[in-house]
C-alpha cells in the first residue's frame, strides 16, 4: 500500500492513546481512609458516574460553575457512595497525612486527584517514546489535543513526554471539547505560533482512540486521522477504513516509517 499523506503536524490524544491508567488506586487510597472497595464493581461504578456527570457538567464543569476539581471530587465521592451506600459525609471529608503526599492533611478525594496528576497513576504505552522520538527526528511538529483538565501538563512532565510537544491543548483550558471544529483550528494556530509556519488542515494528522472525538472529529476539520486501538479484540466502526486502524504504537511507527520514506505522497 502506498502511504497517502506526509504530515507536517501530528497531534495526539493522550488517555488511551499515549498513556494508560488503572482504577486500582481507588482501592489502595480508599483503604487508607477505611473505605474498602470491591474492585470487581469499581469499573462499573466509575463509568456510570463519569457518564452521568459528563452529561450534567460537560468539559469537567468548565461552564457550569462546578470546575474541574469539584467535578472530580464529585466522581470520587459518588464512586465510594456506590460501594458504601451509608457512608457519611464526615468520613468522605476526613483528612489524613498519607504516604507519597506533600505532607499536608488531605481527604480521600484530594488524595486521588493529586495521585492522578503524577506518573504513579499514568504510564506510557509500549512504543510511545520511540514513536514520538522518531517523528520529532523527522522535523514534524507534534502536539496534544485532549479532552482533559488542567493537570495534563504535570502528567506529561512527570511521565517524561512533555518535551516532545510544541503545544498541549486541553479542552478545559480552551473551553471547548473534541470533536468541535474550533479546537482543531486552535491547534493549527498554536503550531503557526510555535514554528512560524502556516499549517493547512490537509497537512495535519490527529491520532486518538475514540471514533467520534478523535477520528471523525479530525476528519470533520478536514484533517487526516488514524485510530489506535490497544485492545485488538475491540470491534471497530465499519465506516473506518481498516488501513486507518492500528493495534499498537509500534505498528503506527512502521506506518510512519513508510510514509516518511516515500518520495511520492498524495494528500
Image (cartoon, helix red, strand yellow):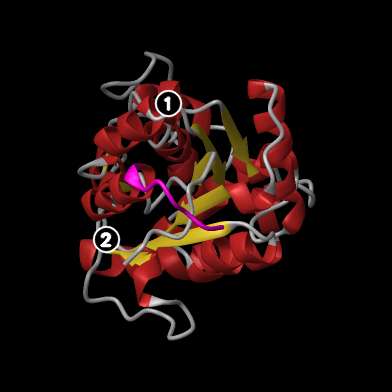
Question: Which corner quadrant holds the C terminus?
Answer: bottom right
Is the Cβ of the residue at disc 1 closer than 8 Å to that at disc 2?
A: no
- The reply to whether residue 109 is in sight is yes
Disc 2 target residue: 230
In the image, residue 98 sits, relative to residue 252, either above or below, namely above
Along the viewing direction, whichever of 74 and 233 lies nearer the viewer: 233
Name the residue rendered at 51%, 60% in the picture. Answer: 225
Q: Quadrant of residue 116?
A: top left
Q: Earlier in the sequence, mark 1 or mark 2?
A: 1
Find residue 35 and report its horizontal and vertical position in percent: 30, 49
**What secondary structure characterizes most of the magenta part?**
loop
Q: Residue at x 49, y 83 (%)?
A: 239
In the displayed structure, does residue 80 sit left or right of residue 39?
A: right
| In the foreground, 20 or 188 | 188
Q: In this view of the protein, can residue 96 be seen by the observer?
A: no
Task: Please provide percent x and percent y for residue 256.
Answer: 34, 47
Pointer 1 residue = 164
Magenta segment: 261-267
Q: Is residue 244 above or below residue 259?
A: below
Please name the residue shown 30% across and 38% down the image. 131
**The N terminus lies in which quarter of the figure?**
bottom left
Q: CA distance from mark 1 to mark 2?
A: 22 Å
Amino acid at each position: 500500500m502506498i502511504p497517502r499523506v506526509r504530515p507536517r503536524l501530528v497531534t495526539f490524544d493522550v488517555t488511551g492513546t499515549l498513556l494508560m491508567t488503572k482504577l486500582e488506586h481507588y482501592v489502595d487510597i480508599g483503604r487508607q481512609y477505611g473505605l474498602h472497595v470491591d474492585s470487581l464493581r469499581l469499573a462499573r461504578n466509575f463509568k456510570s458516574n463519569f457518564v452521568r456527570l459528563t452529561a450534567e457538567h460537560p468539559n469537567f464543569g468548565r461552564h457550569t460553575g462546578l470546575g474541574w476539581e469539584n467535578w472530580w471530587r464529585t466522581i470520587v465521592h459518588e464512586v465510594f457512595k456506590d460501594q458504601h451506600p451509608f457512608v457519611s459525609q464526615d468520613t468522605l471529608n476526613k483528612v489524613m497525612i498519607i504516604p507519597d503526599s506533600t505532607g499536608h492533611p488531605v481527604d480521600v478525594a484530594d488524595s486521588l486527584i493529586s495521585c492522578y496528576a503524577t506518573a504513579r497513576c499514568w504510564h506510557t504505552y509500549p512504543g510511545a517514546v520511540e514513536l514520538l522520538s522518531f517523528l520529532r527526528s523527522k522535523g514534524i511538529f507534534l502536539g496534544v489535543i485532549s479532552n482533559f483538565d488542567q493537570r495534563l501538563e504535570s502528567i506529561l512532565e512527570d511521565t517524561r513526554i512533555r518535551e516532545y510537544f510544541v503545544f498541549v491543548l486541553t479542552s478545559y483550558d480552551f473551553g471547548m471539547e473534541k470533536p468541535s471544529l474550533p479546537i482543531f483550528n486552535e491547534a493549527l494556530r498554536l503550531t503557526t505560533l510555535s514554528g512560524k509556519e502556516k499549517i493547512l488542515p490537509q497537512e495535519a494528522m490527529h491520532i486518538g482512540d475514540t471514533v467520534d472525538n478523535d477520528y471523525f472529529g479530525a476528519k470533520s476539520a478536514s484533517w487526516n486521522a488514524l485510530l489506535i486501538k490497544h485492545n485488538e479484540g475491540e470491534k471497530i466502526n465499519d465506516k473506518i477504513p481498516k488501513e486507518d486502524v492500528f493495534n499498537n504504537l509500534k505498528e503506527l511507527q512502521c506506518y510512519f516509517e513508510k510514509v516518511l520514506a516515500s518520495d511520492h505522497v498524495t494528500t
